[in-house]
Structures are given as structure tokens and as C-alpha cells.
């Protein structure tokens, strides 16, 4: 069965964005007068909670506060997160975060082969627009037929809802689609939605377990940045994942 769609997670998959998110969170906390500062160790732990607003709520839940203090902070989460999103999207729109290795190449190969492209992400549309505008320019809107993201679903990853929404808008069945993810939550969401899933971890998720990843690679590779040990380890044709080989790997696994 031919692959009809590739569905990409954004943060950590299309681009290694979480350090930029962490810095934006800390700048927003400072801007709104909160003395919070998330270290990389804090943030790596907090990333177990998907969604920036949910992540702030989890931080508040761990603080030693009176009920009144907690309620006051919880009421401020939308404002804090809006400040963070403004700070983050401005930095990304300026080009601070590039696409990961092989992403632009694979998008072009898939599009040239007539394969649909979509996004299924927990982050906001504003953040995705900033990243796509900065990295792919106007052609991004032609490349991605569907962008499913943020609060369009109540249940965020690891729930499958955002992937199911993307597939519904694409009109593609899960067994004809491939997901690209970077985290354990993302893998669980994609697998629960029934998609064959490629995982490319980053620093933030390298210690995660990916028990049912269909294919795990350090990144997608490029002719200029070949994958160590490939071809021959997980790939048979090139030292980078081509759309043609991706398609044949999935078909071989499902046959
Ligand atoms: C990763 C997330 C997001 C980002 C922060 O999203 O969980 O919450 O960490 O972005 P993805 P927001 O599904 O793309 O990996 O603050 O906008 O949520
Ligand atoms: Mg991600």
C-alpha cells in the first residue's frame, strides 16, 4: 500500500526548538514579575507535560502555596503563555531555529512524489507559522495541506486526537500515513492513532523509551550530513532517509 501522507510533529522534529521555548518561558516569567527560572534540567523534566499552558500549570502544582495563591497564579496562565508565545515566535521568525537535517529534502521528495504533507503539533499556530515562514518561506503554505495544532483538540499528546484530526482533514487513513516524532509522548500519540512512526530524538528526548517506533534514526540525514553507519544499519540504499526508501521500509513492514 502506497504512502499517501507524511504527518510531522513540530517541536523537536521539524526543528530543535525546545531550548528556544525554554528561554522564552523564562523571559515571560521575568516580564510578568515571577521569579521562576527553568533550568535545562527543570525543563527536561517538565517536557513530560505537553502544552505550554499545561506545563506552567504543572510547575504551579509543585509549588508550596496557599490555595488562594495557587488560584491567583492559575488564573494568570493564559496571559503568561501569551507573553511567552510572543517572545518565542519573534525569535523563531527572525530565523533563530533552522529545520533539522534532512527535513527540507524529505518534504520536497515527498511532495514531488505526490504524497500529502501535514503537521500534527501541540504548539500554537502562531509558533508554527513563525517557524515555517522563517525556514520555508511562502512555499510552506503550498507544502503542508493540513496544520493541526495546539488547542484544536482538548486532549493533547500522548492522546491520539491531534493525529486523528490531521488525518480527518487530509482524508487519509492511518494505515496509509507515516508520522515523524521526537518524543515518547509524540510516539504514543501517533501509534495510538495507527500511524507507522519514524522517531528522531533530540537532546531533550534522547533518554525516552521508544518501544514501538517503526524506525528510529538520530536524524533524517542528507548527502552533506550522512548518517553514521548507513547504509547497512537501518537503511539499505543511502546514508540518509529518502522518501523512496521510507515508502519501501513501511510497505515491507506492513506486508
Ligand atoms: C511540543 C510541546 C509544546 C512546546 C511548547 O509540541 O509539547 O508544548 O514544548 O509550545 P510538539 P507551546 O507536539 O510540536 O512536539 O508553549 O506553544 O505549547
Ligand atoms: Mg515534539
Image: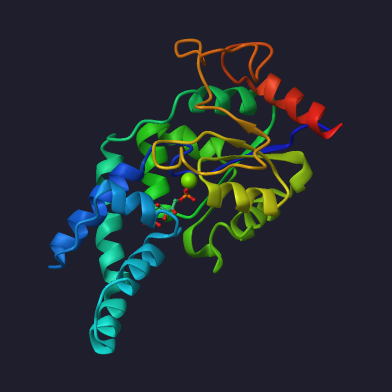
Q: Is residue 168 above or below residue 1?
A: below
Q: Would residue 127 appear left or right of 255 to someone viewing this image?
A: left
Residue situated in front as seen by the camera: 171 or 228 = 228
Q: Quadrant of residue 108?
A: top right
Q: Position of residue 202 (x, y in %)?
A: 43, 36
Outermost residue to the right: 255
Q: Quadrant of the C terminus?
A: top right
Q: Which image quarter: residue 78?
A: bottom left
Q: In percent of the image, x 43 and y 44: which residue is there? A: 11
Left or right: where 118 falls relative to 129:
right
Q: Position of residue 27 (x, y in %)?
A: 18, 55
* Residue 89 in view in this figure: no
Q: Residue at x 59, y 46 (%)?
A: 187
Q: How is the image coloured?
A: rainbow
Residue at 54 percent across and 69 percent down: it is 154
244 displayed left or right of 223: right
Quadrant containing the N terminus in the rendered view: top right
Is residue 252 something one can see in this rendering?
yes
Residue 35: quadrant of the picture = bottom left
Q: Position of residue 7 (x, y in %)?
A: 61, 42
Give the residue at x 16% y 67%.
34
Q: In this view of the protein, which residue sits in the foreground, 248 or 205?
A: 205
Asked if residue 77 is positioned above or below residue 65 in the image, the reply reads above
Relative image position of residue 28 (x, y in whole percent):
20, 59
- Up the image or down, 179 lies above or below 29; here it is above
The number of callouts visible is: 0
Front residue of 116/84: it is 84
Q: Is residue 184 left or right of residue 74?
A: right
Amino acid at each position: 500500500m502506497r504512502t499517501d501522507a507524511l504527518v510531522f510533529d513540530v517541536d523537536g522534529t521539524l526543528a530543535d526548538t525546545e531550548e528556544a521555548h525554554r528561554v522564552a518561558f523564562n523571559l515571560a516569567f521575568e516580564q510578568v514579575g515571577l521569579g521562576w527560572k527553568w533550568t535545562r534540567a527543570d525543563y527536561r523534566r517538565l517536557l513530560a507535560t505537553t502544552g505550554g499552558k499545561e506545563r506552567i500549570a504543572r510547575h504551579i502544582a509543585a509549588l508550596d502555596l496557599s490555595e488562594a495563591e495557587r488560584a491567583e497564579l492559575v488564573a494568570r496562565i493564559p496571559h503568561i503563555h501569551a507573553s511567552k508565545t510572543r517572545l518565542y515566535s519573534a525569535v523563531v521568525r527572525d530565523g533563530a531555529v533552522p529545520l533539522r537535517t534532512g527535513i527540507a529534502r524529505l518534504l520536497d521528495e515527498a511532495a514531488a512524489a505526490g504524497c500529502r504533507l501535514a503537521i500534527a503539533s501541540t504548539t500554537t499556530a502562531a509558533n508554527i507559522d513563525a517557524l515555517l515562514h522563517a525556514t520555508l518561506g511562502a512555499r510552506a503554505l503550498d507544502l503542508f495541506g493540513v496544520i493541526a495544532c495546539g488547542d484544536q483538540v482538548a486532549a493533547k499528546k500522548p492522546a491520539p486526537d491531534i493525529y486523528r484530526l490531521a488525518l480527518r482533514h487530509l482524508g487519509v487513513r492511518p494505515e496509509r500515513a507515516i508520522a515523524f516524532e521526537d518524543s515518547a509522548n509524540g510516539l504514543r500519540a501517533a501509534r495510538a492513532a495507527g500511524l507507522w512512526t519514524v522517531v528522531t530524538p533530540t537532546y531533550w528526548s534522547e533518554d525516552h523509551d521508544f518501544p514501538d517506533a517503526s524506525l528510529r534514526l538520530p536524524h533524517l540525514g542528507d548527502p552533506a550530513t550522512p548518517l553514521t553507519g548507513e547504509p547497512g544499519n537501518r537503511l539499505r540504499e543511502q546514508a540518509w532517509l529518502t522518501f523512496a526508501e521510507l515508502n519501501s521500509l513501511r510497505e515491507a513492514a506492513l506486508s
